[in-house]
């Protein structure tokens, strides 16, 4: 029986072949890894570009509200006989060339107190669409002081965007009676806010304890006066300040029983 002889050359060739196979397998594995990574990068880049493009085609604007850092402020006047109304438009376009092509759902609200509304702006091709929105604000506890209201309109679909505007509601007619203890008279000061109207009717009422100066132009130009019921109505210019003196029955008292309201 012959014994096998050890051949170093064959062993060397076998090890070399094995190392070659391992190297090829490793190269294929590394190549596959980079191929997958590159494909993932390309996919992410494409998706980011798509999202940026679609968001860039989203337009939610208003005639009064904005998403700018500087929130616009508007001044309006109201008599507070009823709740105040704040009206504005919401739009699905920026201009004639930039129009959203999908439905936009939104909610508009007034704070710290006021109504809220939900709505949707439907697309109409290349033609921009708008919706008129009105929010009501109830009378505050102090109707003689300005009330600041923050109005927001927030879209919820297809993208989130919030528009804002501040509205300062001032009384159309406000009045004060200065402290008058020890004085024979009480001075009523009436302020009329600026308005599109040049003049407006104002009713003045008073209680027992004083009588108005009958020579004052406010009284002389009254459209109606009822001394028995202690009331008069007169026409006063807007954006103006008036004063009417009341003669007190008792100088020691602080007379405050006078009111002035817009009609």
Image (cartoon, helix red, strand yellow):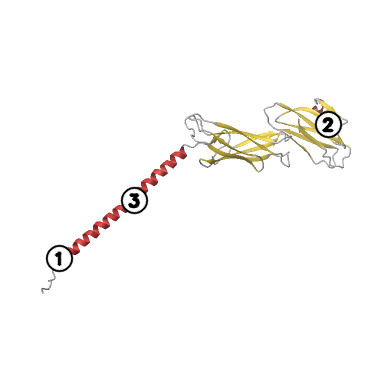
Give how far across and how far down residue 123 sits, in percent: 51, 32
Residue 10 tag number: 1
SS class of the residue under badge 1? helix
Q: Residues within 10 Å of mark 3 (few under 14, many from 20)?
A: few
In terms of secondary structure, where does tag 2 sit?
Answer: strand
User: Of circles 2 and 3, which is in front?
Assistant: 3
Identify the element where label 3 is drawn. helix
Q: Position of residue 143 (x, y in %)?
A: 73, 39
Residues packed near mark 2 inside 10 Å, few (<14), some (14 to 19) or many (20 plus): some
* Disc 2: which residue: 231
At x 13%, y 66%, the residue is: 9
Q: Give coordinates of residue 24: x percent, y percent.
A: 24, 56
Query: From the viewer's perspective, is 252 left or right of 138?
Result: right
Identified at 54% across, 35% down, the residue is 61
How far apart are labels 1 and 2 at the CA level?
Answer: 126 Å
What label does residue 36 carry, if any? 3
Name the residue furthest left. 2
Which sits earlier in the primary sequence, circle 1 or circle 2?
A: 1
- The residue closer to the viewer here, 11 or 170, is 11
Q: Is residue 89 left or right of residue 197?
A: left
In terms of sequence position, does the residue under pointer 1 or pointer 3 come before the other? 1
- The vertical placement of 104 against 7, above or below, is above
Tell which residue pokes out farthest to the front in this image. 1
Asked if disc 1 and disc 2 are in contact, CB closer than 8 Å, the reply is no
Residue 72: quadrant of the picture? top right
Label 1 to label 3: alpha-carbon separation: 39 Å
């Amino acid at each position: 029986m012959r014994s096998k002889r050890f051949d170093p050359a064959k062993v060397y060739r076998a090890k070399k072949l094995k190392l070659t196979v391992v190297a090829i397998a490793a190269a294929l594995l590394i190549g596959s890894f980079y191929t997958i990574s590159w494909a993932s990068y390309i996919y992410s880049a494409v998706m980011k570009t798509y999202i940026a493009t679609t968001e860039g085609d989203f337009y939610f604007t208003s005639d009064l509200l904005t998403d700018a850092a500087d929130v616009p402020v508007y001044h309006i006047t109201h008599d507070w006989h009823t709740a105040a109304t704040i009206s504005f438009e919401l739009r699905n376009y920026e201009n004639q060339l930039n129009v959203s092509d999908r439905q936009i759902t939104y909610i508009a609200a007034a704070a710290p107190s006021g109504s809220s509304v939900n709505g949707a702006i439907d697309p109409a091709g290349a033609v921009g669409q708008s919706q008129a929105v009105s929010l009501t604000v109830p009378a505050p506890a102090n109707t003689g002081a300005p009330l600041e209201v923050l109005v927001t309109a927030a879209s919820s679909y297809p993208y989130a965007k919030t528009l804002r505007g501040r509205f300062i509601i001032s009384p159309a007619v406000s009045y004060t009676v200065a402290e008058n203890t020890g004085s024979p008279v009480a001075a009523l000061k009436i302020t009329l806010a600026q308005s599109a109207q040049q003049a407006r009717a104002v009713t003045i009422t008073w209680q027992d304890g004083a009588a108005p100066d009958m020579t004052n132009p406010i009284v002389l130009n009254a459209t109606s006066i009822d001394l028995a019921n202690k009331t008069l109505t007169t026409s006063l210019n807007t954006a103006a300040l008036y004063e009417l003196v009341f003669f007190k029955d008792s100088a020691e008292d602080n007379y405050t029983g006078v009111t002035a309201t817009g009609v």
